[in-house]
């Protein structure tokens, strides 16, 4: 309620408005429920003030009557001739007190009303300041597109129509999953299939803004890599994409898992779900873990296992066909150019959950 509206409502309730303005206020009360509520609240407040003043006045009157009764009982022994001067004086004093009380009451009402109006104006100013502060906080919060994630990993695009592969352990406890890279920005996804035994999950991009500008440039290699073969990784152990290189150091993974490789590539937990790529730019594995007890030992699920997992996905569990690229368009390119093509396909995977 602004000061102008407050003065209008006060004048309306006190009957100080002209007939025309009085009618306009009444009409506004009919058509504007929020305005009518403010009028009623203000009227209730004024009524409470009046009841308080009436209570004080009544109490003062009763005290005066009681005092008069006490005086008259104590003076019964005096003669009427001696009582008349006293009565006259008492009457004069009472008259003066009544006039003084009336004057003070009117002064108090005026002073109280003035203070009340000033108080209401200050309250309205504070409310406006509070609203502005809340609006500024809201604007600041809107600048943050997402709250901090509970966990993050990596993933990569394997189909031009929006399917992304990552590690199952990255998304297994997720309430929602977003992916992000420089090319496509932030995209909402849904987990459409998981293979816990192979630590593989398939995500589907849900954002309408996603549009592949060209066919997927990578191919999934169906042949197992040899020990000593050079490989490299792209992933998000931090908020920017990181390149690492090394070689296949063992044909089995952790605890002799035949579906995985051991690789001598420096990786971190944020690399989980990212691609393991051969010298020709083909996908040969999915980074899925680090063995902290053996320095420099990391593991990756083989691309053969990935292909077998994708082939076994029930067709009715996918909303759109899964199109896998079989032709490698990066063969013969330099490593730098391969990385430039691959980095558009690799995402940071941000996981959110309520726990």
Image (cartoon, grey):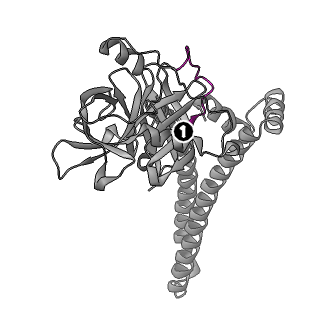
Query: Which residue is at the far left?
Result: 295
143 horizontally vs 39: left or right: left
Percent x, y of residue 67? 52, 76
Magenta-span inclusion, residue 265: no
Residue 116 makes an appearance in the image: no
Figure quadrant of the N terminus: top right
Vertical order, 100 against 296 (above or below): below
Q: Main secondary structure of the magenta part?
A: loop
Vertical order, 337 against 58 (above or below): above
Q: Which residues are magenta?
A: 203-216
Q: Residue at the location (41% across, 50% down)?
A: 169
Q: Nearer the viewer, residue 155 or 145?
A: 155
Percent x, y of residue 308? 52, 43
Figure quadrant of the C terminus: bottom left
Determine whether the residue tagged by mark 1 lies in a helix, strand or loop. Answer: strand
159 horizontally vs 18: left or right: left
Q: Nearer the viewer, residue 256 or 34?
A: 256
Residue under numbered circle 1? 203
Vertical order, 79 against 14 (above or below): below
188 horizontally vs 332: left or right: right
27 horizontally vs 309: left or right: right
């Amino acid at each position: 309620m602004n000061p102008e509206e407050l003065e209008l409502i006060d004048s309306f309730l006190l009957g100080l408005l002209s007939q025309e303005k009085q009618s306009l206020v009444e009409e506004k009360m009919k058509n504007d429920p929020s305005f009518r509520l403010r009028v009623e609240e203000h009227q209730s407040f004024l009524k409470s003030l009046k009841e308080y003043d009436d209570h004080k006045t009544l109490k003062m009157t009763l005290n005066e009557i009681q005092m008069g009764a006490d005086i008259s009982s104590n003076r019964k022994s005096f003669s009427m001739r001696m009582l008349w001067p006293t009565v006259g004086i008492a009457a004069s004093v009472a008259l003066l007190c009544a006039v003084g009380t009336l004057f003070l009451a009117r002064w108090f009402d005026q002073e109280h009303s003035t203070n009340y109006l000033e108080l209401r104006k200050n309250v309205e100013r504070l409310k406006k300041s509070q609203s502005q502060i809340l609006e500024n906080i809201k604007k600041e919060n809107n600048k943050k597109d997402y709250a901090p994630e509970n966990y993050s990993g990596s993933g990569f695009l394997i189909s031009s129509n929006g399917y992304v592969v990552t590690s199952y352990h990255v998304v297994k406890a997720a309430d929602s999953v977003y992916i992000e890279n420089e090319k496509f920005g932030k995209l909402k996804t849904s987990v459409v299939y998981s293979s816990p035994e192979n630590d593989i999950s398939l995500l589907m991009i849900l954002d309408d803004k996603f549009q592949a500008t060209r066919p997927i440039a990578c191919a999934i290699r169906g042949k197992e890599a040899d020990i000593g073969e050079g490989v490299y990784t792209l992933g998000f152990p931090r908020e920017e994409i990181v390149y690492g290189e090394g070689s296949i150091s063992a044909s089995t993974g952790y605890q002799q898992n035949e579906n995985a490789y051991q690789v001598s590539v420096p990786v971190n937990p944020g690399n989980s779900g990212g691609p393991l790529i051969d010298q020709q730019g083909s996908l040969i594995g999915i980074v899925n873990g680090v063995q902290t007890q053996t320095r420099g030992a990391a593991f990756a699920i083989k691309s053969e296992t990935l292909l077998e997992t994708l082939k076994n996905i029930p067709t009715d569990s996918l909303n759109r066909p899964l199109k896998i690229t079989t032709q490698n368009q990066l063969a013969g390119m330099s490593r730098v150019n391969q990385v430039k093509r691959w980095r558009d396909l690799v995402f940071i995977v941000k996981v959110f959950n309520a726990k």
